[in-house]
Image (cartoon, grey):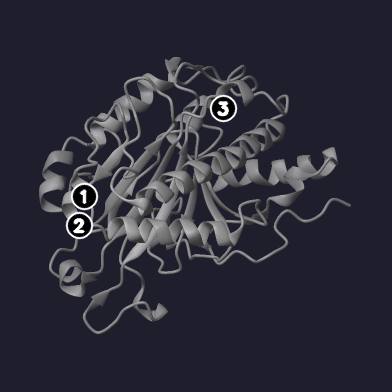
């Protein structure tokens, strides 16, 4: 019998006919095909039903993730002038520092993003890291500032590649689950046109949310690319929208990666796979995360995975032959740049 793909720990999100399953990653590393296939089908089932899952027993050590969070916290503790010197210069590069209030994530196609950015800006700052070696789009490292900056660069470069390896294996699982060749997506993931984002949601007074009912730490949105690997601290605040429109807490589970499908993968799969709306709000009061005056700082580290930017994306085999193709083909890089321009 194949091992259970959701053996531990149990999912904390099981409400309103919406389940975010916890799936053990380690069978994907097995030489046993039936074990890989069993887990692959569980992953595809999660993407088809909720669009989200937790990956446990993955190959990135907890100590590595803790180290990443420590470096991120120290980066955001730098003087504002140092951070501003590394600012993101244009949407096409998607590399560098974004100060609080500069970004407003929202549902694609909204016409009021500029107004929302003024009245309900996202309460976060971020640092964006892309693939190294892209001509014209260098990463904006703090390595010339001090030794900490040099170490920061090395640590983040290594983590970027570790996350890429996980991405490749999850895409192989999706291929298996869909009945495609296990290595179907490898040619789309080889370059690694992905984005590592360090996020800091500063501590905030309760009054900020109390006086503005529309205020969120990060607005309702779906992600843009193939999948997102999310490493989050234990503060909470991530919410996922269920089919009936209710937002449910994606409660942090230590040692797991939260994985969700993005809009481009949904399009690629002819909507077989679901890209689910989510947001970041203030943590629930009952969790003990709130002090007398306000909500504590929150850190998270998403790794946004995309098909390589030179690839043409159209409906995958087996998803359209009976129902037809819902979307025209599109270049991956062009699509992602369109979405980024709408965000910044």
Q: Quadrant of the C terminus?
A: top left
Q: Residue at x 31, y 49 (%)?
A: 220
Mark 2, secondary structure of its residue: loop
Task: Decide if residue 16 is in sight here.
Answer: no
Mark 1, secondary structure of its residue: helix
Q: Residue at x 36, y 77 (%)?
A: 289
Which residue has dot 3 on it?
Answer: 189
Q: Going by the image, does 87 lie left or right of 288?
A: left
Q: Quadrant of residue 162?
A: top right
Residue 339 in the image: x percent, y percent?
A: 31, 30
Q: Nearer the viewer, mark 2 or mark 3?
A: 2
Which residue has dot 1 on it?
Answer: 82
The numbered mark, 2 or 3, whose residue comes first in the sequence reads: 2
Q: CA distance from mark 2 to mark 3?
A: 36 Å
Q: Quadrant of residue 213?
A: bottom left
Mark 2 vs 3: CB contact within 8 A: no
The numbered mark, 1 or 3, whose residue comes first in the sequence reads: 1
- How many circles with numbers are drawn on the protein? 3
Mark 1 vs 2: CB contact within 8 A: yes
Which residue has dot 2 on it?
Answer: 79
Residue 74 in the image: x percent, y percent?
A: 34, 60
Mark 3, secondary structure of its residue: helix
Q: Is 288 above or below relative to 81?
A: below
Mark 1 vs 3: CB contact within 8 A: no
Q: Residue at x 47, y 31 (%)?
A: 306
Q: Few, some or many C-alpha atoms within 10 Å of disc 3 (few <14, some 14-19, many ≥20)?
A: many
Q: Is 208 above or below relative to 324?
A: below
Q: Going by the image, does 28 lie left or right of 278?
A: right
- In this rendered view, identify the residue nearer to me: 271 or 33: 33
């Amino acid at each position: 019998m194949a091992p259970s793909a959701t053996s531990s720990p149990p999912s904390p999100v099981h409400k309103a006919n919406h389940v975010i399953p916890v799936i053990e990653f380690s069978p994907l590393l097995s030489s046993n095909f039936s074990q890989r296939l069993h887990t692959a089908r569980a992953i595809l089932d999660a993407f088809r039903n909720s669009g989200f899952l937790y990956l446990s027993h993955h190959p990135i050590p907890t100590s590595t993730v803790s180290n990443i969070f420590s470096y991120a916290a120290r980066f955001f503790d730098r003087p504002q002038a140092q951070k501003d010197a590394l600012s993101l210069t244009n949407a096409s590069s998607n590399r560098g520092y974004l100060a609080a209030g500069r970004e407003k994530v929202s549902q694609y196609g909204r016409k009021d993003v500029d107004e929302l950015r003024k009245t309900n800006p996202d309460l976060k700052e971020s640092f964006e890291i892309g693939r190294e070696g892209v001509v014209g789009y260098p990463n904006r490292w703090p390595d010339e500032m001090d030794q900490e900056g040099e170490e920061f660069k090395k640590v983040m470069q290594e983590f970027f590649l570790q996350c890429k390896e996980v991405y490749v294996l999850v895409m192989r699982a999706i291929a298996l689950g869909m009945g495609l060749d296990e290595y179907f997506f490898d040619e789309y993931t080889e370059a690694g046109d992905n984005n590592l984002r360090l996020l800091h949601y500063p501590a905030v007074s309760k009054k900020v949310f109390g006086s503005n009912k529309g205020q969120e730490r990060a607005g309702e949105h779906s992600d843009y690319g193939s999948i997102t690997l999310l490493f989050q601290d234990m503060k909470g605040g991530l919410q996922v929208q269920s089919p009936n429109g209710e937002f449910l807490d994606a409660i942090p589970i230590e040692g797991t990666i939260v994985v969700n499908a993005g809009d481009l993968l949904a399009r690629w799969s002819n909507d077989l796979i679901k890209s689910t709306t989510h947001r970041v709000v203030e943590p629930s009061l009952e969790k003990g995360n709130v002090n007398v005056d306000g909500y504590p700082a929150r850190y998270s580290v998403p790794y946004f995975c995309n098909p390589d930017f030179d690839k043409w994306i159209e409906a995958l085999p087996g998803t359209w032959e009976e129902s037809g193709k819902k979307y025209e083909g599109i270049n991956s890089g062009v699509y992602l740049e369109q979405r980024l321009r709408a965000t910044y």
